Amino acid sequence: MRIYRVSFHNNGKVYQLHAESVGQSDLWGFLEIADFLFDEHTSVVIDPAEEKLKNEFANVDVIYVPMHAVIRIDEVSKRGANKIIDSKGAPNNVMPFPGIPGGATGE
């Protein structure tokens, strides 16, 4: 099984999700992400960020992310933590796409 870690901008934050399926969408200019991988809680410790993402994508089969919002796609050997990072205070080493005011976040 292949596992992909996808990082993308969404509403001023950076989302990092793990999924089994990532590819070009039939919708021009969009990336299709499906088969999300979330932690099955076998321990007492629960990550609130992971729970927030799990709830946000609970009834979603596929998401379509605009290509210009994608930061990075990595194929990884095992699933890591899904997270939401506030992009305001984070170091920004991603150049905004030319012609989009405020970069990929549209700010």
Image: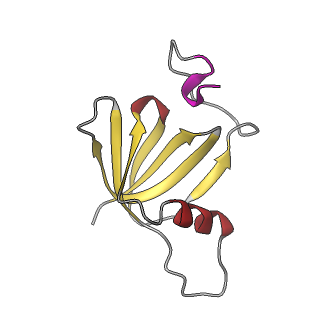
Judge whether 48 appears above or below 103 on screen: below
Q: Which residue is at a point 63% across and 21% down the rendered structure image?
A: 102
Q: Which residue is at a point 54% across and 87% down the rendered structure image?
A: 42
Q: Is residue 33 visible?
A: yes
Image x and y of residue 99, in percent: 51, 12
Judged left or right of residue 74, residue 86 is: right
Say which quarter of the image contains residue 2.
bottom left
Image x and y of residue 79, in percent: 45, 66
Position of the C terminus by quadrant? top right
Outermost residue on the right side: it is 89
Check residue 103 for magenta coloring.
yes
Q: Is residue 81 visible?
A: no
Judge whether 4 appears above or below 105 on screen: below
Write down the region rendered in magenta: 101-107
Image x and y of residue 29, in percent: 33, 29
Position of the N terminus by quadrant? bottom left
Q: Which residue is at a point 49% across and 80% down the rendered structure image?
A: 40
Judged left or right of residue 63, residue 10 is: right
Closer-to-camera residue (62/103): 62
